[in-house]
Amino acid sequence: MCESLRGHVWSCTSRRIPLPPVIDTHSHLYEPEFDADRDDAIERARQAGVEHLLLPNINRESIGPMLRLCEQYPGYCHPMMGLHPEDVKSDFQDTLDAMQSLLTAPDPPYIAVGEVGLDFYWDETFRKEQFEAFEQQICWARDLRLPLVIHARKAQREIVEAMKRHHDEGLTGVFHCFGGSVEEAKELLQFDGFVLGIGGVLTFKKSPLPEVVRSVPLDRLVLETDCPYLAPVPHRGQRNESAFVADVLRKLADVLGKSVEEVEMVTTATAERVFPRLKGLF
């Protein structure tokens, strides 16, 4: 029997066959958790077959580290611009104004508006502000013809209602870190230009995601890590990193009963479709 290891398949004759390239569509590799070994983490991602890292922004402070990483690894790390809902505070409008200036500057490098959305899991103090920030960032994506990368936690109904107001505006994007039910997946996928971001939660023992992904067309899924959070099995409890997207890929192939190569090929094509600024980079 052949054994898979760190992005490679070892044949029965011990010949190493590289897996096809993978895209981590959601990586926070610029975060302080990687300050001690960021270059090594990128090298591990390359060794695991990861061809591109898509970096969602979260707040004003993260812009600098994110852009520096993209400058250090041009063509490999690709920035987004957005304000994470958990970072929406009373001064959110000043932050959005600064971000909008960056997005509308000449030749901006950003491949998406993200990470944006609604999160009412821990705190609803700035609930109204979250709605206002999300609405503005939806409009950025519409006007600039960029995809949206949407974070939703304890906010499915509110996200759907907000998106319905823009249903006919040609929006595209990713519902990031999806972990809901079959019914919730169908509700989100009514938005034709959107796909589900599937990460380490798929590998968790009690996860509902295996049932969900079997009910969803493969070309409505993309792979992600959300590192340094939500490491997949067999790394659960550790710091997540982009190399581990290969574990998500293998698990998804196993759940669907498809080859790793087919799942990689389809999810990569989907990522290219959703993030059109990636086209021509392979």
Image: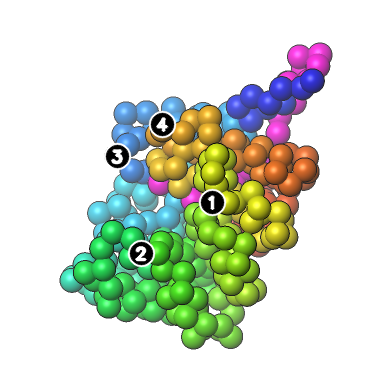
Residue 194 is at least partly visible in this image: no
C-alpha span from label 3 to label 4: 15 Å
Which numbered marker is on residue 119? 2
Give the amino acid at mark 1: Thr
How would you rate the neighbour count of disc 4 (Cα within 10 Å): few for under 14, some for 14-19, many for 20 or more? few
Tag 3: residue type? Pro
Q: Measuring 55% from the left and 47% from the top, which residue is drawn there? A: 207
The residue at 38%/68% (across/down) is 118
Residue 203 quadrant: top right
Which residue matches tag 1? 25
In the displayed image of the protein, which residue is found farthest to the top? 13
Q: Nearer the viewer, mark 1 or mark 4?
A: 4
Judging by the rendered image, the residue that carries numbered circle 3 is 32
Label 4 sits on a secondary structure element that is loop
Query: Which badge, 3 or 1, comes first in the chain's sequence?
Result: 1
Distance in Å between CA atoms under marks 2 and 1? 20 Å
**Amino acid type for the residue under numbered disc 2:** Asp
Q: Name the kind of residue labelled 4 in the image.
A: Gln
Distance from disc 2 to disc 3, alpha carbons, whole Å, reads: 22 Å
Marking on residue 238: 4
Which comes sooner in the sequence, label 1 or label 4? 1
Residue displayed at 40% across by 40% down: 228
State which region is magenta: 10-28
* Rendered image: mark on residue 262: none
SS class, disc 2: strand
Specify whether residue 20 is painted magenta: yes
Query: Is 18 within the magenta?
Result: yes
